[in-house]
Amino acid sequence: MPSREPLVVGAFARLRMAVAVAHSVAGLTLELRFADGTSVRAGPHGGTAGELGICELRAMVIGGGCPPWPVLADRIEHLRLGGAGVVDHGGGLAGRVVPGPDGTRREVWFPTLLAPTTVRDLLHACPTGPDDCIDASLRVDGALGVVTVVCSADERVGAPQLVESARRASAACFVRELLHAASDPAAS
């Protein structure tokens, strides 16, 4: 049986997507700011008076319960990914430069609610640049129903080229989500 694709992305879906990215990319933090001025910060370590662990926040969102995250999600005014060197590229894209044993790599990430097989097919059809020097990997969080796409390249690829490639891939996923929502009679 084919997997069911997502409908229109609401507040709770945006929360799930942000939590999935923060959980799947090492070292990220996620700040949730509510309309009443309060905020919650979740980071890789957590356990402090001012910070939850991202794994704890993920478990809370998956479990729903108390607090009722689907209801609270409507009150979130701002979601912000943070961490060492994180750059917000706009349009749901964020990234950073990652040092490694073989030199530095650039990464750009974005979440989608599409099924992993659909995402793979869309990425396969997206041009990545000269010599296919940009890699894309999927980090699937089945419990949250989110796929985080990580586009990466070594230092030979400029940041603008990597961001543009990730933007094309993200746009392809977003268009597919919109097409599915428009074609589903339950969405109206």
Image (tube, rainbow, N blue to C red):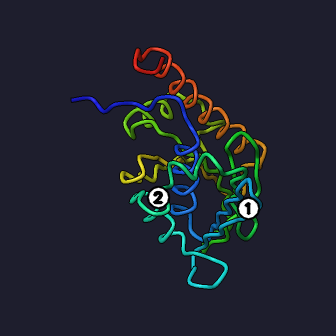
Q: Position of residue 55 (x, y in %)?
A: 48, 70
Mark 2 in CB contact with mark 1 (< 8 angstroms): no
Label 2 to label 1: alpha-carbon separation: 24 Å
Question: Between residues 83 and 129, which one lies in front from this camera angle?
Answer: 83
Q: Amino acid at mark 2?
A: Val
Q: Is residue 4 above or below residue 136?
A: above
Q: Position of residue 41 (x, y in %)?
A: 66, 69
Question: Between residues 143 and 73, which one lies in front from this camera angle?
Answer: 73
- Which residue in the rendered view is the most extreme toward the left? 1
Question: Between residues 68 and 8, which one lies in front from this camera angle?
Answer: 68
Element type at mark 2: helix
Task: Look at the image and tell me in which quarter the N terminus lies.
Answer: top left
Q: Is residue 7 above or below residue 71?
A: above
The circle drawn on residue 25 is: none
Element type at mark 1: loop
Q: Position of residue 166 (x, y in %)?
A: 64, 40
| Residue at which label 1 appears | 86
| Residue at which label 2 appears | 61
Q: Earlier in the sequence, mark 2 or mark 1?
A: 2
Of badges 2 and 1, the one in the foreground is 2
Q: Which residue does the image show at 46% across and 47% down from the upper left?
A: 146
Question: Between residues 55 and 175, which one lies in front from this camera angle?
Answer: 55
